[in-house]
Image (tube, grey):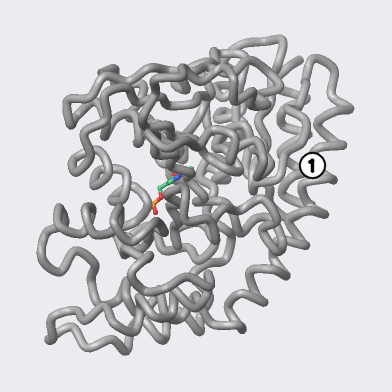
């Protein structure tokens, strides 16, 4: 396994730089959430009941279809350790931890590398694949696949795992499969709520799959503050806050996209729906001169399927995006 797979945006975001490399929502966690988490009783062992109920209700699933995990990354490790796939397929470019987890657990991984513009043709997945992992919307491409396309990947002898860590970037989540018992949906509280350090996430799946994975978990796999976050971030008020942010994001992303498209030598992957854009430049390794100008972007070359011509940039408020585009113009000169 190469070190490149282990590269993540936090390594690009050096102190002092404007961080456009990490995709956590700016200004998070919100104060109301931080206050709730600080009130958690740490002396007791964690009890999952309220958190499982809250997540189940939020997604209109039954509690036995919910498994709480230490972040989405914890779910990928669990899936890799507990299941025995004969042929795992990871659809790239995407977040690399699922592939790392599968390889670390001793599984062979077949990479299906989509070419630009990174739309998915289900027929490209080998018929004998019994585990397929994809992201939706996908990191780093920001492409949102539609439900029928993902549903077309499912089959009686195959488990499809959809990483929906960025699903709440899209208001009402029309393409989410969180209500579909035929797939495993992995969700994260990290991005929308600014809780990377808490390790809070969960998966939604059929009860037999949940039970198999649960048996592979260590005791008390999710901390009490992370359980409190699952409750707090599943309320109607929290969902309304996330929806309002998704609307702002649409607007800010469109502005950034238009500004980037006007820069010679720059192309943006179309159809972006997440909190970031994937950008191709005619020059290579633009992340370096951008860093000299005070901006951290996520270099693209460590993602399978991309090279030094690509970088990913987080969508921020218009003033930051404008300053970034100016720096990019200079960097490309
Ligand atoms: C697509 C995607 N899925 C999952 C994760 C990890 O989420 P968590 O912090 O919940 O483990 C990340 C983090 O960068 C990500 O980009």
Residue 261 left/right relative to 175: right
Most extreme residue toward the front, as rendered? 156
Q: Quadrant of residue 257?
A: top right
Specify whether tag 1 is near ligand 1 (CB below 8 Å): no
16 and 227: which one is in front?
Answer: 227
- Identify the residue at image location x=71%, y=45%: 273
Q: Quadrant of residue 68?
A: bottom left
Picture residue at 43% right of the left edge, 34% below the top: 133
Residue closest to the eye, 144 or 317: 144
Q: Look at the image and tell me in which quarter the C terminus lies.
A: top right
Up-down relation of residue 172 to residue 241 (above or below)? above
Residue shown at the point (61%, 11%) measured from the top left = 284
> Total of numbered circles in the picture?
1
Q: Nearer the viewer, residue 203 or 234?
A: 203
Q: Neighbour class for label 1 at 10 Å: few (<14), some, many (≥20)?
A: many
Q: Secondary structure at mark 1?
A: helix
Horizontal and vertical percent position of residue 206: 38, 57
Decide: is 1 above or below 146. Answer: above
Quadrant of the frame with the N terminus: top left
Judge left or right: residue 271 versus residue 167.
right
Q: Which residue is mark 1?
A: 256
Residue 203: percent from the left, percent from the top?
38, 57
Q: Is residue 198 above or below residue 257?
A: below
Q: Is residue 269 left or right of residue 95?
A: right
Q: Position of residue 263 (x, y in %)?
A: 84, 24
């Amino acid at each position: 396994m190469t070190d490149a797979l282990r590269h993540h945006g936090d390594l690009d975001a050096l102190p002092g730089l404007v961080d456009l490399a990490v995709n956590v929502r700016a200004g998070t966690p919100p104060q109301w959430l931080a206050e709730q988490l600080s009130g958690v009783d740490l002396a007791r062992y964690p009890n999952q009941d309220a958190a499982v109920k809250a997540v189940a209700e939020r997604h209109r699933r039954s509690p036995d279809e919910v498994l709480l995990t230490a972040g989405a990354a914890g779910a990928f490790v669990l899936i890799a350790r507990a299941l025995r796939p004969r042929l795992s397929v990871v659809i790239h470019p995407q977040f690399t931890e699922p592939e790392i987890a599968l390889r670390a657990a001793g599984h062979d991984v077949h990479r299906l590398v989509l070419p630009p513009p990174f739309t998915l043709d289900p027929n490209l997945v080998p018929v004998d694949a019994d585990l397929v992992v994809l992201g939706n919307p996908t990191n780093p491409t920001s492409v949102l696949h539609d439900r029928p396309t993902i549903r077309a990947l499912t089959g009686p002898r195959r488990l499809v795992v959809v990483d929906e860590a960025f699903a709440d970037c899209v208001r009402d989540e029309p393409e989410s499969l969180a209500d579909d018992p035929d797939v495993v949906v992995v969700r994260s509280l990290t991005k929308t709520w600014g809780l990377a350090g808490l390790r809070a996430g969960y998966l939604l799946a059929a009860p037999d799959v949940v039970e198999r994975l649960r048996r592979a978990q260590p005791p008390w796999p999710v901390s009490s503050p992370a359980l409190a976050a699952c409750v707090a971030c599943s309320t109607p008020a929290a969902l309304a806050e996330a929806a309002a942010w998704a609307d702002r994001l649409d607007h800010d992303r469109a502005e950034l996209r238009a500004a980037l498209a006007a820069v010679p030598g720059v192309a943006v992957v179309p159809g972006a729906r997440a909190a970031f854009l994937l950008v191709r430049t005619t020059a290579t390794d633009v992340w370096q001169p951008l860093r000299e100008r005070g901006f951290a972007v996520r270099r693209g070359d460590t993602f399978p399927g991309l090279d030094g011509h690509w970088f990913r940039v987080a969508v921020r408020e218009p003033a930051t995006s404008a300053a970034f585009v100016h720096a990019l113009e200079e960097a490309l000169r």
